Image (cartoon, rainbow, N blue to C red):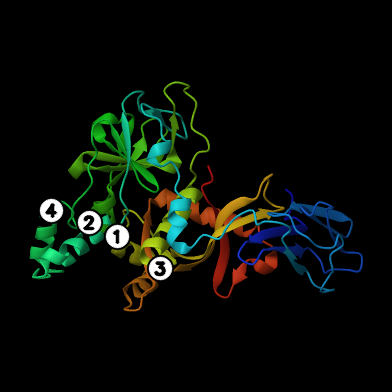
Amino acid sequence: MSGPPRIVLYAELLSNIRQVSVGCSLSSACATTTEASLSPDGQQLTVRHEGEECAVQLPGKVSAPTKLPMQTRDSRNLSWRLPLAGAAPMRFIPPSQLDSQTVAWSASELPVGGIIKCRDCQAMVIGEGTINAWKDLPSENWAEMMEFWHCHKPDNADHDHLHGQTESEEHLAGRGYGANSRIAGKAGTGFVDLSSLLFLEKDCANLTPTETNTASKESSSSTKHGSPVTCSKCSSEIGAIHVETSSVTLYKWQVTISSPESKVDLQPQPTLANCVASMLASTLSRSGCSKSIILPIGASSSSLSQSGESLLHIWLFNGNISFTSSVVESKKPIPAVKVLYRFVTKAEADRLSDSITSDVQEITLPIPAVRGLRHLLERSNQWLPSGDRLFREWTVGLLEKWNA
C-alpha cells in the first residue's frame, strides 16, 4: 500500500484580489536543491524536491518569473502569491447570489416524461411519460415570508399579531402556509427543491418504506421530513415518504434522470457535495448565517444526547472558489466552497442554536448522507498542504459546487 504523497501542491484562485495562492507541503525540510518553477505559459507550477517532481495546473494564468523564490529553507511548507495575467477567469459573487449559482437540476433543465432510476442499481422508480411537468419549489423560508407579508401589509394595520399563539398558527394554516402545512405531490408533476425532487406517491414504484423506532417517529425532524424509503432492489436509502400528503421525496444525489427520447442519463449528475454546497449557500443567502449544525433526519434529541454521537458544525468560509490540487485528478479548475468544520456534542449544538446571539442555522440530512458528508470533508482535507489543513479549532474542507 502506497503512503501519502511526498509533495502536495494546492492552488486557489483569489479573484477579488486577482491572485493565485499556491501552497506546498514536503515530506522533508526544504533543501538547497529544492526548486519551484512556472511553465512558460504561466499555467502550471512544478516543484522538485529530493529527486521527486510534482506539478499542478493553476486555476488561472499567472504572470511571474519562471523560477520562483524559495522564501524559507529548512521548512516543509512553502507558499506563493502569484498575480493573474489578463482577465480573471471567474468573477466575485456576493453572498446574496450564491444560492442561485449552485443549484443542480432546476426545473428548466429536466426532461418532460423522463425516466428516474436508483443511481446505485438502475432500478426504475418513475416510468417514462409519468411526469409531464416540472416546477421549482419556493425558497425554504416561504412560510415565514408569507406570514410576514400578511401580518405587515398596508391594508392590515390592525392585525393583532398573534405570533406564537395557537390562534396565529390556525390562522396561517387556514391560508395554507402555517407551520404544519406541507407541499403535496401532484399527479404527473415533479417539484424541484435544492437537493430533492417531490412526487405523488402513486407515480413512484420500487420503493420500500423503512421501519422507524418510536423515538424517531416522535422526533420533529422525522415528522417534517418524512420516513425513509429505500430502493426495493438494492436497499439504498434514496428518499422519504410523507404519509400525510401521499408524497415522496427523492434525493438528487441518489437518482438518475434520462430523456425519454435518447434514454441517456443527464450529465453531469448532482453529487452529495453539490447538494450540500447548495444548502449551505442558500442558508447564508436567506438568513445571513454562515455557520450550520448538520442534524440527522429521524434522530431524536434524546437519542443523540444518550448516544454521545458528535454533530457536524460547518462554517461556510468562502462560497465561491476555484482550485486545483496535485492530489485530485482534474484537467480543469474545480469550482467549490471552502468550509471549516468541527464536531460538537448535542448539548453544545443546542447552546449554539438557542443563544440569543446565535449565528447558527440547522440543516437536516438523512443519516447515510451525514456519514457520507463526513467522509467527503475528511477526504478533501487531504487535498490541501499539511500546513493549511487546520485553522484554530477548525478543520478545513472543500465541497465541489454544481457546474453544469
Question: Residue 175 has which mark?
Answer: 4
Q: Amino acid at mark 2?
A: Glu
Residue shown at the point (38%, 39%) measured from the top left: 107
Seen in the picture, residue 41 relative to 344 is either above or below; the reply is above
Q: Which residue was labeled with disc 1?
A: 300
Q: Nearer the viewer, residue 1 or 322?
A: 322
Residue at the spot of label 2 = 218
User: In which image quadrant can residue 221 be found?
Assistant: bottom left
User: Which comes sooner in the sequence, label 3 or label 1?
Assistant: 3
Q: Pick out the residue farthest to the bottom.
A: 356
Label 4 vs label 1, nearer the camera: 4
Res. 289 mark: 3
Q: Earlier in the sequence, mark 1 or mark 2?
A: 2
Q: Nearer the viewer, mark 3 or mark 4?
A: 4
**Could you tell me if residue 371 is visible in this image?**
no
Residue 282 in percent (x, y) is at 40, 57
- Kindly state the secondary structure of the residue where label 3 is placed: loop
Mark 4 or mark 2, which has the lower sequence index? 4
Which image quarter: residue 180? bottom left
Foreground: disc 4 or disc 2: 4
